Amino acid sequence: MAVIHDTTLRPTKLELLTSWLPTRPWYQGGAAEPWLAKAGGFRLDDPEGEVGIEFMVVTDTSGADPTTYLVPLTYRGAPLDGAAHALVGTMDHGVLGRRWAYDACHDPVAMAQLLALIDGRAQAQDQNLSDVPDREVTACCTGAGPLPEPATVTDDPDGTLLATPHGPALRLHRVLRPADATPPLAPQDTVGHVTGCWQTPDGTRARAVFAVLHADAGA
């Protein structure tokens, strides 16, 4: 079980993301610095209790229309070998000390737990409270196996794809839109998915597909 500490972070997560988000292919903003606000998300537990796993939702209000992003992060007490390219930044945690924050799509612990969530072996946890399930997060699976390792991680204008040449493919939707604006899942291709909620700037709750598991990399 992940323990949520009531403490300080320097820099904050939003400060790290303000400089990191514009470097991503799926970033929708312009030249101006994003104005980010935390809008929602959930956590997953690392079975070994070493890695913090958070699927954060943030909204950028710097443009004419707010844009909401899914930003999975992992927090580690030491650098992750071979993942310097996925480092979002480092923070000083008031209880745990120096923490290395990574794009969780490149962290095998996080992606294993996301697949466990999809096939029912893990439970989404509240983002801010210890040992409290997040009932707004829903997942389903119709029988695909886990992604073989190592998977290739590719960012594109639509999100992030984890895939192998012959096997399942996992796509994370980085730009979130309410469910009624999201294309329906194709049953012939889709074998699992995760949906979640966030708070919009006008105070309403929105829901969308966060991640989709396809039967093969060509889906």
Image (tube, rainbow, N blue to C red):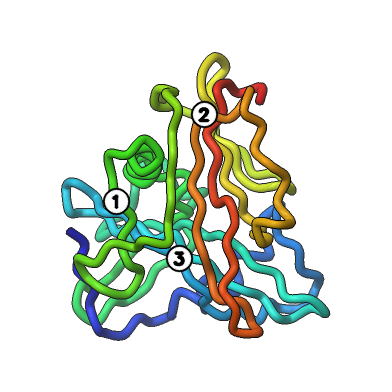
Looking at the image, residue 218 sits to the left or right of residue 209; the answer is right
Q: Is residue 166 above or below residue 49?
A: above
Image quadrant containing the C terminus = top right
Q: Quadrant of residue 139?
A: top left
Badge 2: few (under 14), some or many (20 or more) residues near its Cα, within 10 Å?
A: many
Looking at the image, residue 169 sits to the left or right of residue 137; the answer is right
Q: For residue 33, which numbered disc appears in the image?
A: none
Give residue 197's position: percent from left, percent from top. 51, 64
Say which element carries label 3: strand
Q: Earlier in the sequence, mark 3 or mark 2?
A: 3
Give residue 133's position: percent from left, percent from top. 28, 62
Residue position for label 1: 123
Q: Quadrant of residue 3?
A: bottom left
Residue that appears at 68% across and 65% down: 22
Q: For residue 191, which numbered disc appears in the image?
A: 2
The CA span between labels 1 and 3 is 13 Å
Q: For residue 41, which numbered disc appears in the image?
A: 3
Say which element carries label 2: strand
Say which element carries label 1: loop
117 and 60: which is toward the camera = 117
Q: Is residue 178 above or below residue 205?
A: above
The CA span between labels 3 and 2 is 23 Å
Callout 2 amino acid: Val
Residue that appears at 45% across and 65% down: 41
Image quadrant containing the N terminus = bottom left
